[in-house]
Amino acid sequence: MGTQHPWLTRLRQRTAWGLLLTLLFLCAVGLRRLWDLRHDTGDALALLTGRPVAYGYRVLARFLALLAPTAAEPLTDALAAWTATLWLPPAAAAPPMVYIDGHRKPVYADVALPRGLIGKTGKILGCRALVLLHDAQGHILLATTHRGDQHLTVGLPAILARYEQATGCPPFRCVVVDREGMSAAWLRQMVAAGRTVITLLRSDQYRGLDSFQQVGPFQPLAHDAEGRVLREVASAQFALTVPGESAPLPLWVALIRDHRWQVPQTPDPAADPPPRWDADMPWDGPQWWDATWQAPPAPAVPTEAKLIPLVCTAEVTDPLILVDAYTKRWPCQENIIRDWLIPLGIETNHGYAKTAVVNSEQAKQRTILEQRRDRLHRWTASARKRHGRASRRADQRSHERKTHGETQYRALNQQQCDLEEQEVTHGQIRQTIRARKAEIDAELDGLNQRMWQAERERDQEAAKIKRYCQAQRQVLRDLEDLTARDRPMYELDNRTDQVMTVMKVALVNLGMWVRDQYFPARYAHATWQRLRPFLALKGQITTDATTMQVTLRPFNDCQLNRDLADLCARVAQRPPHLPDGRRLILLMAPPGRPGLDMQRRS
């Protein structure tokens, strides 16, 4: 764990264990942050940690602050190893597919923090970014915390490599991710690493069915109560263009056509231009310029079923396999985040220590402006060179035209004088001079065209120089404005928050394991809110050297009491062992006689 603080090294093992258990079960008793310990008057946290009284806020806050710098990484690796022993098959077997998603929780601060899109609000806010790894059954295997502007394509390979290194399990071959992972270059890297990625194609990457190749027949996927097809699916292929590469990346597609969601038809770029707005109105009746014309409703816009293309980087012959793999993302990941992590306080921030970093947003804007400034400078220099060449060319052609014209007209005048000396008639002289003048004018017209073309090129380059210089001034103005409103950005220290995230993920896995092992079969998909009444039951504890017997007070509901009796019976068949070695036995107390709290008892 590195160099620990002396206060941590002086802690007894029992004390350190009690502090860790307090962090683990903090959210289980309804406390979201350490500050809530100041107002807690219950005994549940003390009971869960094996103490007469729970630890207070100051002790636990100091413990967490000193523990996080050295223990965040080891605790994360320990969580990965523990969840692997709980949910994954033996190391010799090939791991199943996994689901990876990002979750951002906002951090409200007066300083600038790295920002990201908060999904449930749709706003760009300063936040922390979580990367969550789930297995095919929805169990949370690992969670890591990062700065808010980290993209999922960066966090996904990192969390996979970390989990495989911490657990020693074979590489995960199939990864399911949402449309945020739809990056051509990133998909190429994942294919090169031997991984298969299943994701969604973005809507700006295709234009209707014509964008796909080898589209197979559509087969029904879902029906309504009357037997009408609501969704249908077909197999297809798609060639994804990879920037910087000539060969596209082949993708195998499951094309879902959702008839419940109608969208306007995609226009064909090669089709004829759209008709006039009044083409559907009869020409033999009143027209729109007549006072008696009544406006009819416009024709309905042609619509088609919404296409939802699920893509895979490996060859898949049956599109239903892709549909089944991707649609499990909601119950195995999205619902788990909503039903387990959020109720247990995953969106609560812990630790606000921060360090000044480069403002990534302004640095990105500055880079764009500086690149444009340099580009405009190069364009201005090139335009000045072209303007100089065009000016010299225009002057040269003007001089050629002038010299050639003067020479030809001087020769024409001399020819006229020669004809007059030869006593040629005036009519013949005029006819000869007119014919020669037409020849000269034709020659000069060609020279004029070349001269005017050079002048137009010179003027165009001069206009470009003017436009580039004006744009340079604006870019320099934007750079100065950006410097004037420069705001320092701070990056949060996520190690404290990562420690608490590890504790919450561990508590979620513990709750899921207890649900799968001891609760009745009808609770196979129970959420934290459904299990919480059982975990919050009051009762009486009786202990001896080998057992701890807990007599629970029954519910005021017959069905819940039957479930509680079933739970007690399952615990009796396989009694769990507490950390001190004693066995846990659950009993349900007999229902008491109902009465009011203020009733006088004889």
Image: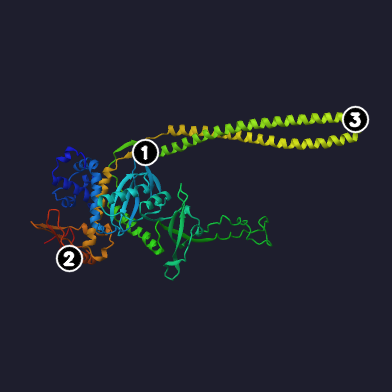
Q: Position of residue 512 (x, y in %)?
A: 25, 58
Q: Distance of mark 2 from mark 1, alpha carbons?
A: 55 Å
Say which residue appears at 87% left-offset and 35% top-offset: 430
In this rendering, would 535 be left or right of 437? left
Residue under label 1: 112
In this rendering, would 379 be left or right of 431? left
Q: Nearer the viewer, mark 3 or mark 1?
A: 3
Mark 2 belongs to which amino acid?
Answer: Ala
Mark 3 belongs to which amino acid?
Answer: Gln
Q: Assign a secondary structure to mark 3.
A: loop
- Say which mark, if any, is on residue 510: none
- Say which mark, if any, is on residue 422: 3
Q: Position of residue 246 (x, y in %)?
A: 47, 49
Residue under label 2: 569
Q: Quadrant of the C terminus?
A: bottom left
> Which residue in the rendered view is the most extreme toward the bottom?
226
Say which residue appears at 38% left-offset and 45% top-offset: 116
> Which residue in the rendered view is the most extreme toward the left?
545
